[in-house]
Image (spheres, rainbow, N blue to C red):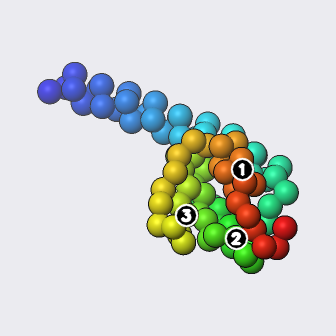
Amino acid sequence: MGDLKARYQVHRKTKQERHARMHNANRKEIADSEYTYIDRGESFLFRDFGCPRVDFYPSTGRWRDLDGKKTYRGGAVTFLKWYSKLQCKSR
């Protein structure tokens, strides 16, 4: 049983490190973008007038379209491409 526990701890540590790297990289991409957002620490809330309400999660690279009720994945670069293609009334 001790071997299984050791493997799980290594797996958990690797997963935490991967999510930390993704979080930092995605956070930098979003901060360098031209869009306005609300930073909630573990998520970015995009609430521009005329655009869909979207929550982006930098540790996983997923985002949730709250108006369309759909979840996407792909990281910050893919998210920014998707968000820029939307026909927003305010832009």
Q: CA distance from mark 2 to mark 1?
A: 13 Å
Residue at 53%, 46% in the rendered image = 73
Is the C-beta separation of discs 3 and 1 under 8 Å? no
Residue at 53%, 34% in the rendered image = 18
Image quadrant holding the N terminus, namely top left
For disc 1, the marked residue is: 80
For disc 3, the marked residue is: 65
Residue 7 image position (x, y, % from top left) = 30, 25
Q: Quadrant of residue 38?
A: bottom right
Give the total number of marks visible in the rendering. Answer: 3
Image quadrant holding the C terminus, namely bottom right
Q: Quadrant of residue 15?
A: top left
Secondary structure type for disc 3: strand
Residue at 61%, 43% in the rendered image = 75
Q: Which of pointers 2 and 1 lies earlier in the amino acid sequence?
A: 2
Residue at 78%, 73% in the rendered image = 89
For disc 2, the marked residue is: 51
Q: Which label sits on residue 50?
A: none
From the viewer's perspective, is the residue at label 2 or at label 1 nearer?
2
Asked whether residue 83 is in view, the answer is yes
Residue 53 or residue 68, whichever sits in front: 68
Residue 72 or residue 59, whichever sits in front: 72
Q: CA distance from mark 2 to mark 3?
A: 10 Å
Against 24, residue 30 (above or below) is below
Residue 51 image position (x, y, % from top left) = 70, 70
